[in-house]
Image: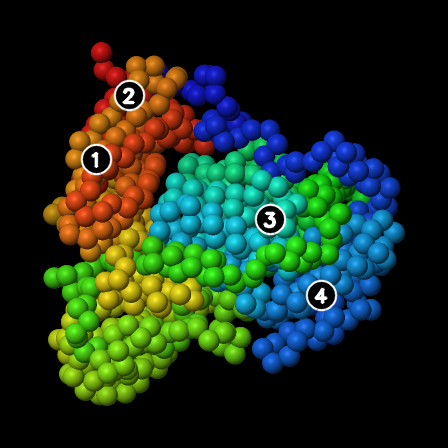
Amino acid sequence: MRSRLVRFWALAHVTIVLSLGIVVASGGVARAGLGAPELTPDQARRVDELLSRMTLDEKVGQMMQLTLETVAAQTAMATRPFVLDEAKARSMIVDHHTGSMLNAAGVAMTPDQWRDIVGRLQQIATGETRLGVPLIYGIDSVHGANYVKGATIFPHNLTLAATFEPGLSRKAGYYTAAESRACGLAWNFAPVCGLARMPAWSRVFETFGEDPCLAGAMAAVSVEGQQGDDLSAATAVAATAKHFLGYSVPRTGRDRTPAYIPDTELMDTYLPPFEEAFAAGARTIMVNSSEINGVPVHASQRILTDLLRGRVGFEGLVVTDWADIQKLVNWHRVAENETEATRLAVDAGIDMAMTPLDTRFAGQLAGLVRSGAISESRIDESVRRILALKMELGLFEHPMPGEDETIEIGSDEAQMLSLEIARRGVTLLRNRENLLPLSGREKLLVTGPTADSVVPLHGAWTYSWQGTDTALYPDTPTVLDEIRHRFGDERVAYEPGASFDEAGDLDAVARAAADADVVILCLGAQPSAEKPGDIANLDISPAQQQLAEAIVETGKPVVLLLIENRPRIITAFEKGVDAVLWAGHPGPHGSRALAEIIAGDVNPSGRLPFSYPRDPQGLLTYDHKHSERFDAGGHGERGYDPLFAFGEGLSYTTFEYTGLEIDVPASFPETGKVAVRVRVRNTGARDGAEVVGLYLTDEVASITPRVRRLKAFDKIDLRAGEERTVSFDLGPDAFLMVDAGGRREFEPGAFAIQIGDQSQTFRIPAAD
Ligand code: BGC
């Protein structure tokens, strides 16, 4: 086998050589200048000139990012506005030379409040400092401009990924950027490029799912949508691919705890979505708060310099995550004190520290330069990147927010997009005896803790960090409201049944169910993110389990709605449930989308972007190894056996696949592409949309191959009876495997492609 191995770096192909001697063919993604700001020669000269005039203190100040709270006389709450402390603002910006600020100090503010505050900070930065360098303001607009009152809130990324429609991610990115920038927020900490491969992790809903191909595609176009063609446009922000690298898979599921990831997996699974975001032009990355294989990423030269800069070729800005240099001391314990931690992080490759509550970082860094521990040219590298980004964003010319008043915040168009994403992302996972759609004549009982609350529809990062402050929410309809609206008040009974934590009046639920033809059981979880979202048990809460069991007991047909931030185990009662709709956090219009799907006004077309585990140990993903296959007939091996698999999702119509054709050029992989075609027909009576997913299997490889991997997909709308041919072209990258040293290589041999129920095996090079 080895002798027939074709090394891509031996061909005329882009090559990446990792430190430790790891060689990686990049798949064509890496090229010089990834993430580098695009400046005119004049702008580049201005950056150099400015840098040459800066004192050391001014430079290290540029590398510091403070949270808005540091300049607050009063933080914002639902009941009171933010008040700026002018003296503190001057101290931070003029005396400490702070180059960047972030976050909402407390909760969401109106566009005018944002413009006033960011505008005032910019006035101080540009008018009262020696060199007049504007601030760059960073924010977590992770599903719309979620810290701006009145802005459009979109479904969270996991629901967006379930659409399998990158076009929707691009549009959401555009509106998110435009509505943020209109408030002076020019830098967005999104998209997440990590993968949901550890279901217990509290940030699963922020990801685009478990698969690198899907996540990479959705993240790349989000970057394009946010950044547009011209970063200085009034609708553009600088996007952030986060959190580099391997943050999403802590071994225990608890946020910011150790991950153990071998190089093969790092390269073959976790790096690719970031590479896609870089290829799309992402200007910045945020670093993984946690550690991989015992090394905190903020202190990892190997990840932040050798891999990111040297091998991938990323030239954009690297910002730390929240207080993560300090955490090298007290959390990770790789540094004895903060000065040492600062040295480690700057040596590793960070450009800006989200300190974010104090200015100690700048003093420590200046001290390190003065003592010779860090060279000033190293500082210049980072400061040049920061100034260049500000220049490219047009902040030197237009530091004041909201100058372009044509941007409407929360426009009807953007709200319709949010609804559309919910309609196309909600996923029908079971529909026994075609219970759905309902006829409209049934009497319904609606019950469960997600039935009459807007909070789980939105999720964390909505108006506040954890998203649970209901006083901040505008009047948005709940699932119950929308079901009543669609089916008529007289047909819909409601019993809360349970809160997330406490069972309610189960007798009342049983009595109401006895009167109903169908029960809509609305379960899920209270939104949460990061450490506050850590859980000890993946099971759905006991109170909800009791409610579900009581409902199942009644023998009535049950439609289960799952409105939740990560999959919670429902195995104890799922067999008694006839239909299942997964919604994730579908956003403010998610209730309408759910009601429309239940009523049959919308034909569901979402596909699950992750594997829904059957049991808490069901940690496997669809692209597992052959030895992790489920084998009921053997010795009872328990392999991949999710309750619902990645890619699963039903429609109210049916689709048939025929005529798979695969054309492998004789010269492949040196030149050419593998052309794949398949016919898809809507064989049912309704119009519908189908996700056509192309999966590749490397039949035999020197590193145990995965059973299959998604390599391309397309979502097509087909009218009842319509047939269409779908084509894909696969380049050599699709056929690379990662060897033990982390090298991406091509190994000749047998491959198989599956699309729908069609499958074909072929060899590369073709057998003579
Ligand atoms: C999160 C980041 C976020 C940052 C700034 C951190 O706690 O991990 O995702 O961008 O805070 O709010």
Reading the chain from its start, which is encountered first: label 2 or label 3? Answer: 3
Q: Which mark is residue 679?
A: 1
Secondary structure beneath label 3: loop
Residue 308 appears left or right of 551: right
Residue type at tag 2: Val
Front one among 227 and 356: 227
Report how far apart the C-alphas of labels 2 and 3 lie in the structure.
41 Å
Give neighbour class at mark 1: few <14, some 14-19, many 20+ (Cα, 10 Å).
some
Between tags 2 and 4, which lies in front? Answer: 4
Residue beneath label 3, please? Answer: 236
Residue 411 visible in the snapshot: yes
The residue shown at (86%, 46%) is 55
Residue beneath label 4, please? Answer: 117
Residue 768 appears left or right of 269: left
Where is residue 299? Give x, y as percent: 62, 46
Secondary structure beneath label 2: loop
Between tags 2 and 3, which lies in front? Answer: 3
Report how far apart the C-alphas of labels 2 and 1 lie in the structure.
18 Å
Residue type at tag 1: Arg
The residue shown at (24%, 45%) is 718
Between tags 2 and 1, which lies in front? Answer: 1
Residue beneath label 2, please? Answer: 664
The residue shown at (34%, 36%) is 711
Report how far apart the C-alphas of labels 2 and 4 lie in the structure.
59 Å
Reading the chain from its start, which is encountered first: label 3 or label 1? Answer: 3
Residue type at tag 3: Ala
Report how far apart the C-alphas of labels 1 and 4 lie in the structure.
56 Å
